[in-house]
Image (cartoon, helix red, strand yellow):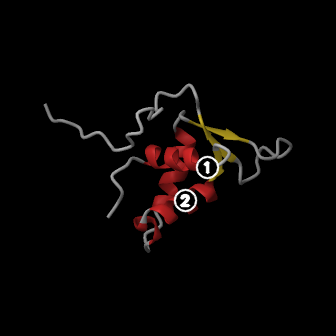
Amino acid sequence: PKPPYSYIALITMAIRDSAGGRLTLAEINEYLMGKFPFFRGSYTGWRNSVRHNLSLNDCFVKVLRDPSRPWGKDNYWMLNPNSEYTFADGVFRRRRYRLS
């Protein structure tokens, strides 16, 4: 089954569990495959979801691995300290939306 976490929460878990507080996209994917069986299956569309969330959410910051090659791949991703997605309480589960 799919983990009960948003992609933002999953990526945050991976980065927080890293030694240096930053990971490449490939390292984030490896973390998810190692921790959750869902990501080891035949479905690979989740990889696009991870990449999409990294690029579009301001809670993640791209750090160039080589500043002389800003177009290069394998840049690092870190958590934005000014983001509202801090998960300070350690609760990564998705909030259920209530119908009014």
Q: Secondary structure at mark 2?
A: helix
Q: Work out whether 85 lies above or below 69.
A: above
Q: Position of residue 86 (x, y in %)?
A: 48, 32
Q: Quadrant of the C terminus?
A: top left
Q: Position of residue 78 (x, y in %)?
A: 62, 40
Residue found at the far bottom of this picture: 42
Q: Residues within 10 Å of mark 2 (few under 14, many from 20)?
A: many
Q: Amino acid at mark 1?
A: Ser
Q: Secondary structure at mark 1?
A: loop
Residue found at the far left of this picture: 100
Location of mark 2 (residue): 31
Q: Work out whether 17 lies above or below 40.
A: above
Pointer 1 with pointer 2, Cβ within 8 A:
yes
User: Measuring 65% from the left and 45% from the top, which residue is drawn there?
Assistant: 22
- Of 16 and 73, which appears nearest the observer? 16
Q: Work out whether 54 lies above or below 2.
A: above
Q: Amino acid at mark 2?
A: Tyr
Location of mark 1 (residue): 18
